[in-house]
Structures are given as C-alpha cells and as structure tokens.
Image: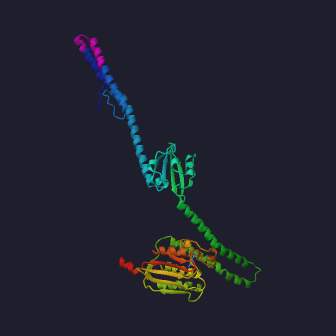
Amino acid sequence: MNTADERTITIALILTAMMLGWITGELAWCLFFGSLIWIGIHYAEFNKLREWSYRPLGRPRNALDQWFAVAYEPYRLLTRERERTRNIAMRLREVVGLTEVIPDAVIILSSAGNIENINSAAKAMLQITDKDVGLSLASIVRSPPLIQFIRADGGANPLEFTSPINPDKSFEARRFDVDTGRTVLLIRDISDLNRLLTMRQSFVANISHELRTPLTVVTGYLENLSDPSLPLELRLPLTEKLNAPVSRMQTLVEDLLLLTQLESSPIAGRQQPVNMHAVIAAAYDEVKNLQTSDDQISIRCESDKTILGNEKELHSVCANLLSNAIRYSPTGMPISLNWCNVEDRVRLEVVDQGGGIAKEHIGRLTERFYRIDMAGARSRGGTGLGLAIVKHALLRHASQLRIESEVGAGSRFYCDFQPLDEKNDSS
Ligand code: ADP
C-alpha cells in the first residue's frame, strides 16, 4: 500500500486555507476549518492504527507515512518473530519425525514432567497413546524407578529397569536435560543384550571348567616328571598317562573352533555333490573303536540320492550322532544309522535303545555345554559341544536336527535333506 507524505498534505491544506481566506476575506475562519480537516485526517489515521492494533498480524492500513511508520516497526518485528516460530515448529516436526526411525523409545518431557512428544517405539514399549500427550509421565507409566530417575537431578548414569508391561524384559533409560527445561528420555530394550552377556559369561565359565580338569591332571604328572628323585623307568608310564588329558583338551579346542566356524555363517563352506554312503562309512570308521561290541552299529543306506553340501561338516554330523548313541547306550545295545528316502526328501537317522532323554531336556540339548548328567557325560568323554555342532552344521545345509526320545526306551535323532537331483529338476 502506498502512503502519502504527511508534510505535503499539511502544507497543501494550509496553502488552500490561506488562498480561500484571501479570496473570501475570512482568513481566520478558513484557517480554522483547515485545522479541523487536518485534525479529522489525523483522527481517522489514529483510528486505523487502533483498529490495526487489535489484529497486528495484518499489514497496517494507515495512509499517511508517519502513522504508517508508527505501526510498521512493531508489524515488522511481529512478522519476523512469527516466521521464526514457524521455522522452529517445522524443525521440531522434522525432529519428531526423525525419531520415528529410531528403534528406541524417545520421549520429550516438559519442565513439569508432562509428555510433549513420543515416537512409535515409546508407544509400543510403554503402552502410551497419543491421548496421553500433555499428561504427566508419572501418571501413565507405572515404574517407580523410572519416575524417580526422571525427577532426580542430573541422572548422568543410565538406569536399568524392568519393563512395566512385561516383567521378562529389561529396559535401559538415559536422560538428556535440554536448556529450555525439557528432558529427552531415551529408553531401549536391553533384554537380548543381557541374555547375550549371560550366555557369554556362562560360556567362558564352561570352557574354563572343561579345561581345568585335564589341565590339573597334566600339571600333576608334569610335577612328578620333573622330580629328579623319580627313577627313569617310572617316568615313562607317566608320559603315557599324559595322552588322555592332552587329547581331551585338544578335542575340546578343535570342537570349539569348529563350532565357531559353523556359527559364523548360515551357508555351508565349499558345497559340492556329496555321496553320503562314503561320508557315513568314514564316520563309522572314526567311531567304531568306541563300540562296546563288534556289531553294535548297523548301517542301512537305502537311498542312492546325493545332496549338495560340505563333506567335512556332514561327516561331523554323522560322527557326533553315532558317538553319542554309543556313549549313551548300555554296553552292546544295538544302534542303527539309516540313510533313506522319505517322500521327496532324504533322511539321515540314528536310532539307539539307550536310556532316552526326558522331555524337558530335549529342547536344550543343542545348547553349548548343555548336559543332562554333567558328571556322567564328562566321564563318557564328551565335550558338551557335539549336538551344538550338529545343529549348526545342519542349519548350514537347510536342514534341522529333530529329536524323539523316551526315557528308558532310547532315542531317535534325524534330519532331512533336499536331494540334489530333485533340486535340479525343480530349477
Ligand atoms: P556331550 O559331549 O556331553 O555328549 P552333546 O552336545 O553331544 O554333548 O550332547 C549333549 C547332551 O545330550 C549329552 O550330555 C547327553 O546328556 C544328551 N545326549 C546326547 N545324545 C544322547 C543319546 N543318544 N541318548 C541320550 N542322551 C543323549
């Protein structure tokens, strides 16, 4: 809107009044009426300013430049402030939008502890809804440790607490106090992390335990061997006695390395068509010395199908299942290994008539170092890693270990594979 120069209008008004006064001879009256008009114009401008002040977000409507200048400065400041607020709101919306991609719960609290913003993870983890925004967090989340943590000053150390929704879950909360008095609360689910830490601790404890026994034996023999008073003929039998604990440690380390390697990838290393007859024969050769009678193991290879896989890993599967069947069966009890077709798959099956396994243990047998009878299993020479190796080797062959067992009646360990020819047919 264009404004008029107030000084020009005033001068024009005075000149007009003087001219009219000179023509009419009534100069005083003309100047008087001129002043009235001048006051009227300014009164109208003042009213416009007053009206504008009720709605200061619109542009001022004053026509005279001096009045316009009076209104324009606050109008400019207001507009700038409004723009700034709009930008901040936009940024805040963007930030809140970004928190949606964070898998952890993000909660923004006001200085009074009321919820200002939450992301989807927070809604899911703490069962907060959009309706709860604006309410106090303490009135919605039933977790005294968390509420105490929010109310406490500082809070540099993260808080670990149990989920108020699911007592099996553990959460970790961190708080960040912002200048404006707000608090940003980050909560993450650390249940899996805790489980992993516990597993790692028990894994290290198990390995130490497994190694300690043979190491103690070796140390004892070595002490005797280094005794200078011991006659030479007595030392030789001692060196032979070192074989058993040393080979036990060696087997344990080899099994550990193999398991680590198998766990590192879900795909079997160096796959090729495998003739399982040869693999089974080699595994039998490896374990046959453990048999408690010469014909304890009977092998039936009814299927001629080949599978795609890694010979070494499949050998490990057969050898572990066979050696377990021997070790957990009473002397001479028959054991059978079958390689047979079952529908469109080919099955490897090891069946024994040993003591069997109670139901509650079956699901945990493939855990590292899980044994039903710890002392008994150790004395039988196992490392506690056999079935874990079998499980992971099979997973790398798109197969799964299945166990059926009954206490007192024996066990059946089996797994199915996709035969190679049918794979090619279907592709
Ligand atoms: P281990 O070296 O102790 O044999 P495994 O991982 O091979 O470790 O087996 C885990 C546990 O499963 C064994 O300690 C044993 O309690 C049980 N188990 C495995 N195979 C059999 C079986 N054929 N019959 C009965 N129990 C078995």
Q: Main secondary structure of the magenta part?
A: helix
For image coordinates 31% across by 24% down, the residue present is 44
For image coordinates 70% across by 84% down, the residue present is 237
- The image quarter in which residue 407 lies: bottom right
- Above or below, 221 relative to 7: below
The part of the chain drawn in magenta is 20-37
228 or 41: nearer the viewer: 41
Magenta-span inclusion, residue 25? yes
Location of the N terminus (image quadrant): top left
- Above or below, 152 relative to 22: below
Q: Position of residue 235 (x, y in %)?
A: 72, 82
Q: Is residue 186 left or right of residue 80?
A: right
Q: Residue furthest right?
A: 229
Q: Residue furthest top?
A: 25
Q: From where the camera sits, is residue 37 visible?
A: yes
Q: Is residue 304 left or right of residue 160?
A: left
Q: Position of residue 15 (x, y in %)?
A: 27, 17
For image coordinates 37% across by 28% down, the residue present is 70
- Above or below, 10 relative to 265: above
Q: Position of residue 38 (x, y in %)?
A: 30, 20
Q: Position of residue 146 (x, y in %)?
A: 55, 51
Q: Is residue 26 left or right of residue 91?
A: left
- The image quarter in which residue 16 lies: top left
Q: From where the camera sits, is residue 272 visible?
A: no
